[in-house]
Amino acid sequence: MQEQKRPILSIKRKPSLMYQKPPQKPDSEQNAAQVDQQQATTASSTKAKPKYKNPPEWKDVKHRFDVECLKLFVKVGLLPGNSRQRK
């Protein structure tokens, strides 16, 4: 005869203290704490990257690349040039 398998009962655990919500502060203290946090983050944050609506024109950024890099771009077909074009 086959033995009947008993279902495994799940163990219910009490939530640990680290997962419990901290006690709520009154609104005035909570708002003051949020303002302090915002000031701390803005003071320590680095310069924000510029958000371009459109990418910059090639003539504005080509001075950042050396000659070999420009030749590679033309060879690959990213820039117009005298080399073969990809199709």
Image (spheres, rainbow, N blue to C red):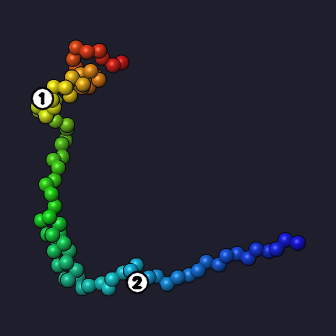
Q: Is residue 23 left or right of residue 81?
A: right
Q: In the rendered view, does 4 fall on the left or right side of 42?
A: right
Q: Earlier in the sequence, mark 2 or mark 1?
A: 2
Look at the image and tell me whether residue 26 can be seen.
yes
Q: For the residue marked with disc 2, what is the amino acid?
A: Leu
| Relative image position of residue 26 (x, y in whole percent) | 24, 85
Q: Find residue 35 and report its horizontal and vertical position in percent.
A: 16, 73
Residue reaching furthest right?
1
Q: Is residue 47 left or right of residue 12?
A: left
The circle on residue 59 is 1
Gap between marks 2 and 1 measured at Cα: 60 Å
Q: Which residue is mark 2?
A: 17
Instruction: Please give the count of numbered marks on the rendered protein.
Output: 2
Q: Quadrant of residue 53?
A: top left
The amino acid pointed to by label 1 is: Lys
Is residue 57 at all visible to an observer of this figure? Answer: no
Vertical placement of residue 64 versus 42, above or below: above
How many neighbours does mark 2 have within 10 angstroms: few (below 14), some (14-19), or many (20 or more)?
few
In the shown orientation, is residue 3 left or right of residue 68? right
